[in-house]
Image (cartoon, rainbow, N blue to C red):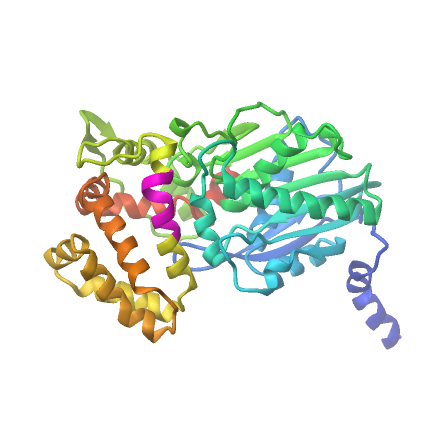
Amino acid sequence: MKKKVVLLALLPMLLAGCEFEPDSFETDLKSTVLMVGYSQEYAQEFVLKHDVLKTPSNEFNKDLALFTYGASMANKNKDSIVKFYRDMMFSSLELSPAYDYQPTKDSIAYAIGSRNLNHEKVVLISVRGFNYGAEWSSNLNVGLEGDHAGFRAAAETLLEDLDDYIKTYHHQNSKFIFTGYSRGGAVANMCAKLLYENQNKIIKDENCYFYTYEAPKGCESYHEYNNVYNIVNPADLVPMIAPAEYGFYRVGKDIVLDNSNIEEVCKNYDETIVIPEFKPFTYGGAEVTQNTLPQTLIDVLRTPSFGEQNIDTREKFVNVVQGTADYFLSMFMSLPSAITSKIGAALTEMPTMDVLNLIGNPEGIANFLKPFLDEAHYVYDDAELLSYSQKLSTFIVSGPGVGLIMIYGLFGDDFSRMIQMHYPEVNYPLLAAL
């Protein structure tokens, strides 16, 4: 009897690890995920219902949205995403190599797994959107023309591996679910565009379900694909970039979350969530609200009101910002957290005027950073560090950066609130309330 109990207890794990893909069960499958939060993690249970794909792909399905949100939340590291796939009994699991090495500006991590669901083969593709370190710089790699260069390169890598997966496991007639949060959502959205453009694809359009969350824009043209749903919080800056003014879009349909009662919704979800109060202010003769602040910041960056430089075109962004941002982001994302914390603490302890003087002095910026870089054994070139420090100083002092500093100094809580609007503990309860 004891042996039978042990075998029954092991059965789900045995099934999840074998090539046979189990079909629907009487009860729904569940997985608890620790969601990354603004200041803490939140344990949330997600459900896979056996009939979740009965709705055609051209109809929004809230149950599928909540499930794919979980698949996106779980994709913060290798252990978490593997646990989610196994809990939901997906097999033939393949992970991109990027989970096993330090992220670079060109890496992308994703998981692919399959199972039978309601007597149909289903392939789930989840793209990592958290804890991706130096990959952050790829978000700013827009390129001079065409689709967003960073997102497209990542999507092409994913689709190449997916093509091999389909051929290996004979999933030509399967249904495919793509999902991702933030950068992961942008890559999933780009996959939709590339799949629709590919005339020789082996995946049928009607068999694809795309659900993205807080995804930046990356496509050079807009198409209202009926099976692509982009869930966005209008108070979040991330879905506003790369700006439409540069010619960037998300393909598919945007589903805008209602954040008009966000404090109460979040408090009902978890009473420990604290959101800074928004204090509307006037800029350019118009009142700035939580939902117009992201566009206001983009407008500040795109106008020369505060200096000689501006980045009102894609070309100017590439020439003025992209290389400098890539340099410093790659640097900071490669440093140990203990070192970046020391840098932040040192800046916080400096008087405001000293910080402003430091920003205006390229040599001062370089000399300020060197001891921290040396402590971290980070390899850098003195001339290159000084050159990029000069570009950073010029952008801030003689360009729109000074406008951002002024607005942040006056309305810091509003900025903190906007940053929190990108986090799951805010957007999950808004999604659940749809």
For this orientation, the residue located farthest to the left is 353
Q: Is residue 152 left or right of residue 7?
A: left
Quadrant in which residue 246 is drawn: top left
Q: Is residue 328 visible?
A: yes
Residue nearer the viewer, 226 or 13: 226
Taking the spot 82% from the left edge, 49% from the top edge, the residue there is 168
Q: Is residue 369 magenta?
A: no
Q: Is residue 434 visible?
A: no
Q: Which span is picked out in magenta?
A: 318-326
Quadrant containing the N terminus in the rendered view: bottom right
Residue nearer the viewer, 179 or 99: 99
Residue nearer the viewer, 62 or 163: 163
Q: Residue 42's spot in the image, x, y percent?
A: 49, 57
In the depicted structure, whether residue 266 falls above or below residue 311: below
Q: Residue 293's spot in the image, x, y percent?
A: 30, 35
For this orientation, the residue located farthest to the front is 383
Quadrant in which residue 382 is drawn: bottom left
Q: Residue 199's spot in the image, x, y percent?
A: 72, 27
* Magenta stretch, overall SS: helix
In the depicted structure, whether residue 379 falls above or below residue 119: below
Taking the spot 43% from the left edge, 50% from the top edge, the residue there is 137
In the depicted structure, whether residue 338 falls above or below residue 365: below
